[in-house]
Image (cartoon, rainbow, N blue to C red):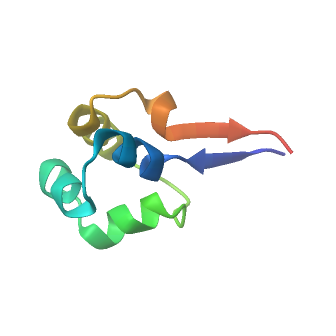
């Protein structure tokens, strides 16, 4: 079975946006965004994903990647 890999750190670096700035725009705590950025979460709400995509002007596929084993 494959796995979903979060690429939030890459997209944030491409957009030159800090964790604090993204947190303010999305309305999610720094701690939770940091966990997402480091791939330490097991789920994400669609509303959170939508807010992140809106703030970063990206598509969900830019943040999420499926990797087969």
In this image, 63 relative to 23: left or right? right
- The front one of 29 and 45 is 29
Query: Which residue occupies the extreme bottom position in the image?
Result: 31
Rendered location of residue 63, percent (x, y):
47, 39
Q: Position of residue 46 (x, y in %)?
A: 37, 39
The foreground one among 50 and 15 is 15
Q: Is residue 65 above or below residue 33?
A: above
Question: Residue at position x 44%, y 31% from top?
Answer: 60
Q: How many discs mark residues in the rendered view?
A: 0
Q: Image quadrant for the C terminus?
A: top right
In the image shown, does 22 or 14 lie closer to the viewer?
14
Q: Position of residue 13 (x, y in %)?
A: 37, 48
Residue appearing at x 50%, y 54% in the figure: 43
Residue drawn at (54%, 39%) of the image: 64
Image quarter in which the N terminus is found: top right
In the rendered structure, the answer to whether residue 38 lies left or right of residue 32 reads right
Q: Going 27% across and 37% down the picture, which residue do you hit? A: 56
């Amino acid at each position: 079975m494959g796995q979903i890999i979060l690429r939030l750190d890459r997209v944030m670096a491409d957009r030159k946006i800090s964790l604090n700035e993204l947190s303010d725009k999305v309305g999610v705590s720094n701690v939770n965004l940091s966990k997402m950025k480091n791939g330490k979460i097991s789920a994400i709400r669609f509303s959170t994903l939508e807010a992140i995509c809106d703030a970063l002007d990206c598509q969900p596929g830019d943040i999420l990647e499926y990797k087969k084993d």
